[in-house]
Image (tube, rainbow, N blue to C red):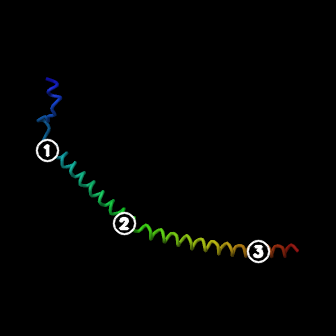
Amino acid sequence: MTDDISAHWSLDKRVPIAALLAVVLQTGAMIWWASGVEARVGQLEQRHDSTLPSRIAVVESKVDTANQNFGYNRAVMDKIDGKLDTLLNDRKK
């Protein structure tokens, strides 16, 4: 008798139909929501992939400009350093 009960799944009549319906609807809503999220993530990935090369080019040009400015600033600082050394040497004499 116990083998017969455990072999077949059955639903007790004490479980309200409204509770079953609520679980089924919530499961369906969750699957629908998840598919919408997947679609939005896919769109964002495509948009990100399409703009990435142009964004990299902008960043590279900014880095090149910064490197040029650094070189210029370094040259100016070397000139100032040389002039200060000259002034300090003249003062010592």
Percent position (x, y) of residue 65? Answer: 57, 74
Question: For the point 49% across and 71% down, which residue is it?
Answer: 58
Residue 76 sits above or below residue 40 on the image: below
Q: Quadrant of the N terminus?
A: top left
- Residue under label 1: 18
Tell me which amino acid carries mark 2: Arg
Q: Quadrant of the C terminus?
A: bottom right
Question: What is the secondary structure assignment of the residue under circle 1?
Answer: helix
Between residues 38 and 21, which one lies in front from this camera angle? Answer: 38
- Residue under label 2: 47
Percent position (x, y) of residue 41? Answer: 33, 59
Residue 52 sits above or below residue 11 on the image: below
- Residue under label 3: 82
**Along the polypeptide, which appears first: circle 3 or circle 2?**
2
Between residues 78 and 64, which one lies in front from this camera angle? Answer: 64
**Along the polypeptide, which appears first: circle 1 or circle 3?**
1
Tell me the distance, in whole angstroms, between the alpha carbons under discs 1 and 3.
88 Å
Mark 1: give few (<14), some (14-19) or many (20+) Cα within 10 Å.
few
Q: Do the CB atoms of the residues marked 1 and 3 lie less than 8 Å apart?
A: no
Mark 2: give few (<14), some (14-19) or many (20+) Cα within 10 Å.
few
**Along the polypeptide, which appears first: circle 2 or circle 1?**
1
Residue 41 sits above or below residue 73 on the image: above
Q: Is residue 9 left or right of residue 49?
A: left
Tell me the distance, in whole angstroms, between the alpha carbons under discs 2 and 1.
43 Å
Question: For the point 14% across and 44% down, which residue is it?
Answer: 18
Question: What is the secondary structure assignment of the residue under circle 2?
Answer: helix
Of the two numbered discs 2 and 1 in the rendering, the one whose residue sits closer to the viewer: 2
